[in-house]
Image (spheres, coloured by chain):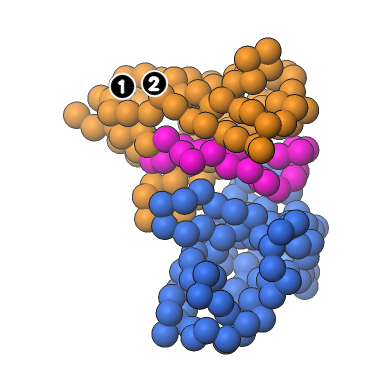
Chain colours: A blue, B orange
Amino acid sequence: DIQMTQSPSSLSASVGDRVTITCRASQTIDNYLNWYQQTPGKAPKVLIYAASSLQSGVPSRFSGSRSGTDFTLTISSLQPEDFATYFCQQSFGTPWTFGQGTKVEIK
Amino acid sequence: EVQLVESGGGLVQPGGSLRLSCAASGFTFSSYWMHWVRQVPGKGLVWVSRIDNDGSTTNYADSVKGRFTISRDNAKNTLYLQMNSLRAEDTAVYYCSRTTFVAGWIDYWGQGTLVTVTS
């Protein structure tokens, strides 16, 4: 199975901060990397697909990038509604695997 | 509006069975791959199974292979997950979800249904 190592597991940040979350795949997954946001009690919501494509309706402060097997989700200016847990997920190999999640909390 | 509505969760004893259903609406169900993803409350997401648009191809996580069966009825716009030989470690919220193609991203999720396996 492809292992997805996500870091950090949690972070504290203030409104307006730039936030970066990373995910490293254990082998090449090309661009088959997606990012999801989940708030408590709700289903996840896709933010970024195919490593860097912004899902329709998602604010442009969210962006994704890839360098080899390292992937990054960036929130350029954190907003109150962005305090949530973020997961990466690879869809290159079966089984699909998710990162462990990053909980973004208010500082 | 796309909607995925799961049902069938509940309390079951170890070794028991449950069948989850997911009623789809607002899109052409027969055009999409469908998936089940589960999550222990407060923990991470785990992909469980997927089925192609016509039901001819299915895949499973090793942890459920041989115990769970995914199926679909395109005439009823419904996805199913038959869960047999349930274990305590199967306790989770089960989400129904869709992708446009096999290696795609999940663009819609259901609200989830809780399965609790306990004696």
Q: Secondary structure at mark 1?
A: loop
- Classify residue A37 by image quadrant: bottom right
Q: Is residue B65 left or right of residue A62?
A: left
Query: Which residue position is annotated with label 1?
Result: B15
Q: Label 1 to label 2, Cα distance in Å?
A: 10 Å
Query: Which residue position is annotated with label 2?
Result: B18
Up the image or down, A75 lies above or below B84; here it is: below
Up the image or down, A52 lies above or below B55; here it is: below
Residue B61 coordinates in the image, percent (x, y): 55, 36
Residue B41 coordinates in the image, percent (x, y): 37, 50
Instruction: Name the residue nearer the viewer: B110 or B101.
Output: B110
Disc 2: which chain? Answer: B
Q: Secondary structure at mark 2?
A: strand
Q: Point out the stretch of residues depicted in magenta.
A: B92-113
Residue B44: which numbered mark, if any? Answer: none
Give the residue at x 62% y 82%. A77
